Image: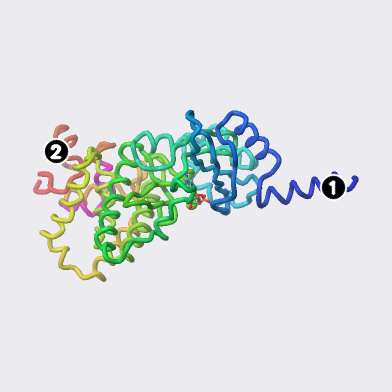
Amino acid sequence: KDTQTRDKDKSDRATSEQVLDQRTRMILYQMINRGVVSEVHGAISTGKEANVYGAVAFADDFSKVYRAVKVYKTAILSFKDRERYITGEHRFKAGADKGNNRKMVKLWAEKEFRNLRRIHSAGIACPEPLQLKLHVLVMGFLGDRRGWAYPRLRDANIPADEAEQTWSALYIQLLGIMRRLYQVCKLVHADLSEYNILYHNKQLYIIDVSQSVEHDHPRSLEFLRMDIKNTGDFFRKQGVDTLADRIVFDFIITPGGEVEEPGLKQAIEKLYATRAESATDDKTAAEREVDNEVFRQQYIPQTLEQVYDIEKDAETIGHGEGDKLVYRNLLADQVVLPKLPDEQVSEEDQSDEGASHDSEAEES
Ligand code: ADP
Ligand code: MG
C-alpha cells in the first residue's frame, strides 16, 4: 500500500474511535444537503456509546435554530451491558443480531428515536426527535439561544434561598413525569438519574431513552424500581422529604391514575397527607431506609407465570396482607387472581378489587 492509502486507513480507524468515521460523515453530508442541519459543531458530550454534537439549522424563515445530533458509536464493544434491555423486548425481535455491531447500533438509535417520539407526543418535556438515519439521530436542542446546552440536573444551579422549595417541586414534577411515562407512553426509562435529566428554569427534561423498555418487558418493573431508587437517592441528597420507594412505585403503576395537571400534583399531595395520617410518618429516617431496602429486595414477578409461589401469595392476599405484595396493583389490572383453595369469591368481587387486601375472603 502506498503512504496515502495507509494514512487513510489509519485515519478512518482513528476517527471511528473518537470523532466521525467515513459513513457517519456521509450521513451528515446528506442531512446537510437536505437542510436537516446546516453545520455540525463540536461535541457537547462524548460518551462510551455515543457522542452528542451541537448543530445549527435554518428554519423556514431563515432564522437560526440549534439542533443536537447524537451519533452512536459503531466501534463499541460494550454491548453486552445492553443485552438485558433487548432480551424480551418485542420491538427488537426482528433483527437483533448480536454478532453485528453496526446493525445493533442502528437498532439502538431507532429505539431512541421511537421512544422520543412517543414521549414527546405525550407532552413530556424531552428533545423533539427530528430525523434518523442509521446510527445518527437528529433532535431538538435543549439549550439557550446562544447555543449552550441546559445543564444536567446534577449540575443544576439553584440559588440557595429557593433551593428547598425548588427541589421539592422538582421531585414532585419528576414523579408526575414517571407516571405519565408509564401510563401514557407505556415505557420505563430504565436509566433515569440526575445524569439523564436536563434542567432549565424549574423544568425537567428527560433524555437518553435508547434503553427505555415497554411496560410489558419482563424486567420493566425491576428497572422501574431502580429508577425510583436512583432518583429518590438524588433528591434525598438535596434535602427533599421523599416518599417511600414502594409508595412511588404504586403511584406510578396503579392503573387509571390521574396524568394531567392539576390532578397529578393533587394526587401526590394526597400521598403525603396519607403518610402524615398513618403511623409511618413517625418513622425515623433509618426505619424508612429499612423499608426501602426491603422493597428493593423483593422479587417482582411481571406476569402470573412468573409468580414465584402462587399458593403462598394467594394466601397472603387472603389474609388481608396483600399490600405486602409488590405487584398487587399489577395483578388487579392485568391478570385474574389465583383463587384460594376453598375460596368462594364471585367473578364480580375479583374484577372489582382484584388483589386488594381487605377483601371479604379473609374471614371465610
Ligand atoms: P449518553 O448515552 O452518552 O449518556 P445522552 O443522550 O445522555 O447520551 O447525552 C449525553 C449528553 O449530551 C447529555 O448529558 C446532555 O448534556 C447532552 N445532550 C443530549 N441530548 C441533548 C439535547 N437534545 N440538547 C442538548 N444537550 C443534549
Ligand atoms: Mg446519558
Q: Is residue 291 visible?
A: no
Q: Which mark is residue 6?
A: 1
Report the amino acid beneath label 1. Arg
* Way the structure is coloured: rainbow
Mark 1 surroundings: few (<14), some (14-19) or many (≥20) residues within 10 A: few
Q: Which residue is mark 2?
A: 344
- Residue occupying image coordinates x 57% and y 31%: 35
> Which one is nearer the viewer's eye here, 306 or 283?
283
**Residue lying at 17% horizontally and 47% vertically, measured from the top left:** 266
Q: Residues within 10 Å of mark 2 (few under 14, many from 20)?
A: few
Q: In the rendered view, does 126 fall on the left or right side of 139? A: left
Pick the residue in front: 104 or 115.
Answer: 115
- The x and y percentages for residue 236 are 31, 64
Disc 2, SS? loop
| Cα–Cα gap, marks 2 and 1 | 80 Å
Vertical comparison of 177 with 233: above or below:
above
| Figure quadrant of residue 155 | bottom left
User: What's the residue type where badge 2 is placed?
Assistant: Gln
Mark earlier in primary sequence (2, 1): 1
- Please report the bounds of the magenta region as a residue range: 320-331
Helix, strand or loop status at disc 1: helix
**Is residue 271 located in the magenta-colored stretch of the structure?**
no
The x and y percentages for residue 307 are: 33, 46
- What is the x, y in percent for residue 354? 20, 40
Instruction: Tell me the quarter of the picture where residue 341 sits.
Output: top left
Position of 213 with respect to 237 (left or right) is right
Kindly tell me whether residue 262 is visible in this rendering. yes
- Location of the N terminus by quadrant is top right
Q: Is residue 183 above or below residue 280?
A: above
Residue 147: x and y in percent read 49, 48
